[in-house]
Image (cartoon, grey):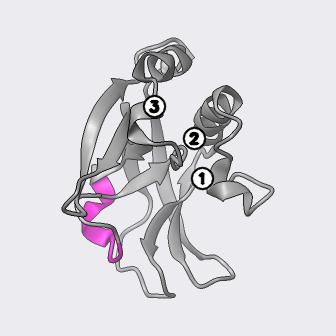
Amino acid sequence: MVVPVPEADALVVDAPPGVGAHVTVLSWFLAPADIDETAIAEVLAPFAAFDFELDRVEVFADGITWLHPEPSEPFAELTNAVWRRWPECPPYEGAHDDVVPHLTVAKTPIAVDAAFPIRCRATEVQLLEEGDDGVFRVRRAFPLQGVA
């Protein structure tokens, strides 16, 4: 599940086929048949669309280049809400203790040629599904229409 960020599509170097710029809410490790879209809609219903900025470039210790969303808290709140509903699917497969909302640009350290800040608006959460051809597609989009 991701929040698409089309304002940054041109900056992303490494992404799976069919996946544009995004901030991940939660990577799914459930079989597609086990995903309850009604439950996802219920979890996301309270969340309203929100404005944010990509304000700087960062590099994780493992070399991944990413953009920092400000504010980051709404993304963390989305992740935590979904994780509470599906505790068997921890963020980052449980590899990290903290949720760090980010937009991955590249899997290696690179220079990012952009004028910061980049103003963005989060309007939906997309449930992506990988096809047999290895291309990801939007299985369902959940509009952020609630009152946060």
Say if mark 2 contacts mark 1, CB within 8 Å: yes
Mark nearer the viewer, 3 or 1: 3
Residue to which mark 1 is pinned: 101
Label 1 crowd (10 A; few <14 / some 14-19 / many >=20): many
Does residue 76 sit above or below 68 in this rendering?
above
Counting from the top left corner in percent of width and height, residue 63 is at: 59, 85
Q: Nearer the viewer, residue 118 or 33?
A: 33
Discs 2/3, front: 3
Identify the residue at image location x=35%, y=80%.
113
Label 1, secondary structure: give it: loop
Gap in Å between the C-alphas at discs 3 and 1?
23 Å
Q: Which residues are magenta?
A: 7-14
Q: Residue furthest right?
A: 97
**Can residue 122 be seen at all in this image of the molecule?**
no
Residue type at mark 1?
Pro
Residue located at (44% from left, 59% from top): 117
Residue visible at 51% across and 70% down in the picture: 66
Tag 2 secondary structure: helix
Number of marks in the rendered image: 3
Q: Is residue 25 above or below residue 117?
A: above
Quadrant location of the N terminus? top left
